[in-house]
Image (cartoon, helix red, strand yellow):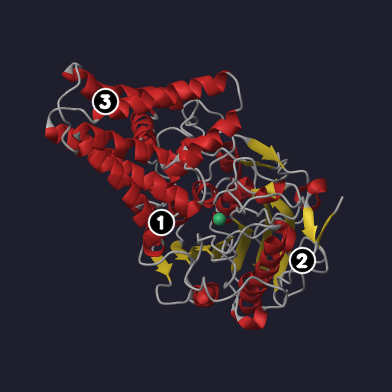
Amino acid sequence: MRGCIKIVLLLGYLASFHGLYAERITALGVGLPLFLYVGVFGVLAVALLLGAWIRPSPLRWMLALLFALSSVFIDAYTRITDSYMTYSAFVSMVYAGGFVQEALQQYHHAIALAMAKAGLLLLGVGLRPGPAPRLPGWLSIASPVLALALLVAILFIRAGEGARGLPVMYTPLAYLSLMGYEAVHDSVGPRQPVSLARPTAPLARDIVLVIDESIAGNYLDINTPAGVDSHLNRAQPGVDIINFGYAASVANCSADTNVTLRYGGTREDYLRINSTQPSIWQYAKAAGLGTVYIDGQRTGGHLQNLMTETEKRDIDQFIQFDDTPVVQRDMAAVARLVTLLADGKPQLIVINKVGAHFPVHDKYPDDFMTYRPALPRGRFTDVTDIGTRDGFDGRPQDWLLYRNSYRNSLQWNVGEFFRRLFAEGDLSQAVVIYTSDHGQDLHERGNPGLNTHCDSDPVAEEGLVPLLVIQGQGLKTLDWQTHLAHNRNASSHYNIFPTLLGLMGYDRAGVATVYGKALDQVTDDPFTFNVRFNARLGAKPDFRHIDLGQVVTPGPDQGVTAVR
Ligand SMILES: [Zn+2]
């Protein structure tokens, strides 16, 4: 009888994920892969049932708890993000605690549902089994372990892929095992101190890197006639604006790009460079600059974009805006930048703006609702990035509204940001490099889906970002002009770190050897972005070339046009 209850609970639990199984089966189609999938599924399911008949209670309840926690984790993730949890996403999430916290605050419903389902699993495994079927005791203990090992082996061979549609509670445990393996075998080693020579003093008093969020290169007036007014496409008194046009991002996910911008990873060697070489803060401090980080996205001291407490120790001023509404955070950032530019101290200032990440319903004030019709207002005022997709179905009409709200957000968080910077900031002793972490898929082609970036098979626009330099007129820094024609619409994020080091006075040849070309040199960039940044366990990064001839730009009305 007790055995029956356990079996009903466990089958009920497994059945509650039927949608995922159907998805995987449909994706596989009829053939050998489907046969293998069904086989592995069977092994994992049987191992679960056997595990529920472990005789020693403490051991059985331990397994029950482990499985239940694992289940809540992956199930809640799937509900909240409406996407499958890949190994890369898992690894990123383990580091990027900021998103987890926001999810906990906003998604009680999804988490409660996931917990309810995991309850079936907890009781199904944990409850005392009735009279034992005629099975050796060791088999029930070994089964779940061997099943997990099987899954780990599959994921290892397939570089993290292959758990889709399998009983979900194994997946996070398998991912965790892989991470443990990588931690032991990747020989990441201690972070190195600065060793590059620095023959000259920094070339400007303030060196500023503004990393915007989700700003599509093809939606700003600096790159396309019907683009949104950025205040960057006109002469501004006292400054030179050098527009490098379209640029390729490091990756199409925020954390991947950001960590690489802070550590200077190259296409060829980013895993090693990002984890063992000095940060931009270390280089700045060694060059005698103060270090300032302004994070408009997170609050309460929470770190994001793979920043660690160790890295943070090299930041003199760590600034977040805990009490500022999301819609005002970029304005708070520019106000703080204006103050820093006026304080007379030599500094490196890096800014993560709020920009225009999903959801964009409420990222601009009413006065800036120029593009209409726009998405309904008022539901996302406290959200910087992830947000529930409720009410946004990704139909063509929804995306039309989205693009209008997006452009309104650009008018505010980009246009107004720079209007204030030029009006109030003293840029006479400053060099500012401006870009965005990645571009956007705004579904101009009518392609289905709810995501704007971070896709594993993205459109080219996800890797297309703006890139420009602003500096005080009369400053003698780097020679931006000589190779501008060659580098315009042809450079990438990878050219930024060497540029920053050049501005700090580091030896140009030495910098180029380790980090590649700066923007004042002939960049000859491959113009690609990486869609498999967590290339590990033998996997190779997946660099996608951007063909500018295929890029879609917004038209003068609410529609969009493809330009050739
Ligand atoms: Zn981003």
Q: In the image shown, does 552 or 164 lie closer to the viewer?
A: 164
Q: Residue furthest right?
A: 564
Residue at (59, 70) in percent of width and height: 361
C-beta proximity under 8 Å, tags 1 and 3: no
The location of residue 366, given as percent across then percent down, is: 62, 82
Foreground mark, 2 or 3?
3
**Is there any visible trace of residue 277 in the rendered image?**
no
Amino acid type of the residue tagged 2 in the rendering: Gly
Q: What residue do we see at 82% from left, 64% from top?
A: 555
Q: Residue at x 22, y 32 (%)?
A: 3
Q: Amino acid at mark 1?
A: Ala
Amino acid type assigned to the residue bearing label 3 in the image: Leu
Left/right placement of residue 541 relative to residue 522 reads: left
Badge 1 or badge 3: first in the primary sequence: 3
Please provide percent x and percent y for residue 83: 52, 47
Q: Indicate the quadrant containing the N terminus: top left, top right, bottom left or bottom right.
A: top left
- Which sits in the foreground, 465 or 511? 465
Q: Marks 2 and 3, Cα distance to the nearest angstrom?
A: 61 Å
Q: Residues within 10 Å of mark 3 (few under 14, many from 20)?
A: some
The residue under label 1 is 110
In space, the residues marked 2 and 1 are separated at their CA atoms by: 38 Å
Residue 311 at x, y percent in the picture: 38, 52
Q: Residue at x 14, y 27 (%)?
A: 55
**Left or right: 28 in relation to 473:** left
Q: On residue 227, which mark appears? A: 2
Q: Which residue is mark 3?
A: 50
